[in-house]
């Protein structure tokens, strides 16, 4: 196993902060920040335990047989497509709600 290598792993667990996988004798984690550059409401809506998944290796710990992995590096999205994706939650929702909140605060 080497950095930047593409590998296929099996999902063994899903938490709110990431995905746990196994690949041969190695165990790995895909942190939520390495799944997508966009807001993710629920990881378990995207992946299931037992799924095979192609990932890119960020870091290898040979002594502990642990991997830091990335889904988004293994599945890059073309910049033109990224511009067309609308973020439904996150800062954009807050920026739309802010003027209403300001108006409500002024009425108090």
Image (tube, rainbow, N blue to C red):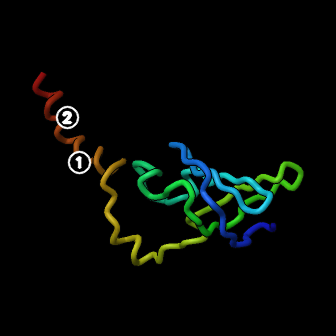
Q: Nearer the viewer, residue 11 or 100?
A: 11
Q: Is mark 2 on a helix, strand or loop?
A: helix
Q: Which of marks 2 and 1 is nearer the N terminus?
A: 1
30 left or right, relative to 83? right
State the residue position of label 1: 96
Q: Which residue is drawn at 69% across and 72% down?
A: 6
| Quarter-of-image position of residue 17 | top right
Classify 10 Å Cα crowding around label 2: few (below 14), some (14-19), many (20 and above).
few
Circle 2 residue: 102
Q: Quadrant of the N terminus?
A: bottom right
Is 103 positioned to the left or the right of 54 in the image? left
CA distance for labels 2 and 1: 11 Å
57 relative to 101, above or below: below
* Residue 92 image position (x, y, % from top left): 31, 51
Answer with left or right where residue 43 lies relative to residue 3.
left
Picture residue at 44% right of the left edge, 58% below the top = 46
Furthest-top residue in view?
108
């Amino acid at each position: 196993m080497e950095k930047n290598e593409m590998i296929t792993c099996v999902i063994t667990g899903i938490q709110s902060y990431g995905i746990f996988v196994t690949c041969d004798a190695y165990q790995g984690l895909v942190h939520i920040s390495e799944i997508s550059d966009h807001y993710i409401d629920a990881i378990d809506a995207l992946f299931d335990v037992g799924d095979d998944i192609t990932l890119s290796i960020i870091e290898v710990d040979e002594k502990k047989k642990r991997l830091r992995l990335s889904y988004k590096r293994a599945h890059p999205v073309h910049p033109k497509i990224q511009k067309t994706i609308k973020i439904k939650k996150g800062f954009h929702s807050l920026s739309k709600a802010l003027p209403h909140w300001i108006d409500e605060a002024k009425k108090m």
